[in-house]
Amino acid sequence: MSAASAKKTPADDAKPVKKRTCKKTEKTPKVETTADATSVKKRTCKKTEKTPKVETTADATSVKKRACKKATAKKTAAATPENASPSTLSPTERRRLADRVFATLAERYPNPSCALDHMSPFQLLVATILSAQCTDKRVNAVTPALFERFPTAEAFADAPVEAIEELIKSCGFYRAKAANIAQASRAIVERFGGSVPATLEELVQLPGVGRKTANVVLGNAFGIASGFVVDTHVLRLSRKIGLSDEETPEKVERDLNELVPQSDWVDGSHRLIYLGREYCVARRPQCDVCPLGAFCLKRP
């Protein structure tokens, strides 16, 4: 019995050892090797393919932007007189610029006048209301038939709004303009005896009449310089030239009233408008031949 037991024991012990050895040597290394290879391959792909492309694109874009900024800065500096920044003009420098601008414009346009055709203060009031978001040329094409049909404030006050609309339809926003003209006419008849009032405070109380319209009527119909007229041309050119940093008509008017003598408010506004139509057209400014080209700040 003891001999048999001695023979079986080594064999029995050898079998489990052999099985454990196979599991460790055959299966485990294959899993680890595949995983390691895949991991190494993935890390290599990320480093060699993705990362460099992102970094290169970002670097190129950054360089391009910096180059654009430098080019823009150089262009702006070259367009600015004495390389002065438009935002750092002192009051004295801005007043000097304004004197130079309006002296030059007075030489270029010695006898300016209102571009809206009219025969009375009331006709000018109606024409100015129609000129909002519309060219003076179009208004002048519409008003002859309009004033022939309705020659006075009383005639407009009694007219059906639809009849006014039909005659001014080509001026744009014709419904709102017709309503304002009819209401303003009634107010003039009822409160001012059919005559257009000659004060800024009274004019701006009429429907459809703001400071710009009131300044136009007072300056051109009554010879009263109540304020610098700021229309779309004056608003755009004042900032482009460097006369004002503001963006609203009221604030630009305030700046121009301070820079320009009151005696030049009426003619000065006409001259800026002439410049905007002849040289400084919004979409295609002719800076190379503009009379202000040597000292205009040429701001966007």
Image (cartoon, rainbow, N blue to C red):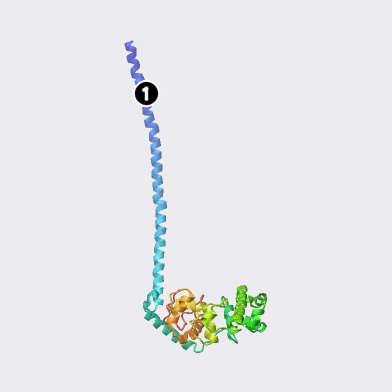
Say which residue appears at 67% left-offset and 75% top-offset: 162
Q: To which quarter of the image does residue 40 belong? A: top left
- Image quarter in which the N terminus is found: top left
Find residue 253 and report its horizontal and vertical position in percent. Answer: 47, 79
Say which residue appears at 41% left-offset and 55% top-offset: 54
Say which residue appears at 40% left-offset and 53% top-offset: 51
Q: Confirm whether residue 257 shows in the render.
A: yes
Q: Confirm whether residue 281 shows in the render.
A: no
Q: How many marks?
A: 1
Q: Amino acid at mark 1?
A: Pro
Name the foreground residue: 219 vs 112. 219
Position of 76 relative to 61 (above/below): below
User: Is 257 left or right of 141, judged from the image as shown?
Assistant: left
Find residue 17 and report its horizontal and vertical position in percent. Answer: 35, 25
Residue bearing the label numbered 1:
16
Number of residues whose C-alpha sits closer than 10 Å to that of mark 1, classed few (under 14), some (14–19) or many (20 or more):
few
Q: To which quarter of the image does residue 92 belong? A: bottom left
Position of 169 relative to 57 (above/below): below
Name the foreground residue: 16 vs 208. 208
- Image quarter in which the C terminus is found: bottom left
